[in-house]
Amino acid sequence: MHKRKVNPIGAPAPVGPYSHAVRVGDMLFCSGQIPIDPATGQLVAGDIRVQTERVLENIRTILEAERLGFESVVKTTVFLADMADFAGMNEVYARYFTRDFPARSTIAVAALPRGARIEIEVVAHYA
């Protein structure tokens, strides 16, 4: 099966040797996104709500480049540097995923790249 890398204009540059996403068949596998401002390339300042919103906007850019939306997402994995941020993350997350919720795992981690408080990866399906 053919795989195609996805690196959309307008998404923050990857912080390592990886693609923003890879399409294989009718599935899109998006790399974990941290709260990088695409205009500055810097981590956004702010609490978990601000960082979660930036992450989800970065994911929106990737999805829209493939003519997909959040309704196409079938699985998310959320990595939190502090589980005390769960409620704040969930509050913002619920504004982006409003129906037909994807499967989700939320994992506490010791640290994230660039000192981010959150990272989210998604898997989407082309309907």
Image (cartoon, helix red, strand yellow):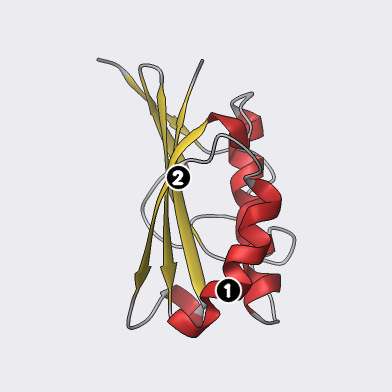
Of helix, strand and loop, which one carries label 2? strand
What number is the disc on residue 122?
Answer: 2
30 on left or right of 43: left
Q: Nearer the viewer, mark 2 or mark 1?
A: 1
Pick whichever, 34 or 75, lies toward us. 75
**Residue at point 62% right, 74% down?**
88
**Residue at point 49% right, 19% down?**
126
Of helix, strand and loop, which one carries label 1? helix
**Residue at point 56% right, 34% down?**
100
Q: Quadrant of residue 29?
A: top left
Pick whichever, 114 or 91, lies toward us. 91
Q: Position of residue 91 (x, y in %)?
A: 66, 65
**Residue at point 64% right, 54% down?**
94
Pick whichever, 49 or 86, lies toward us. 86
Badge 2, how many Cα within 10 Å: few under 14, some, many 20+? many
Up/down of 44 relative to 14, above or below: below
Up/down of 96 relative to 43, above or below: above
What is the count of numbered marks? Answer: 2
Q: Position of residue 43 (x, y in %)?
A: 62, 74
73 on left or right of 60: left
Disc on the earlier residue, 2 or 1: 1
Identify residue type, mark 2. Val
Up/down of 46 relative to 12, above or below: below
- The span from disc 2 to disc 1 (Cα, nearest Å) is 20 Å
Residue of label 1 = 87
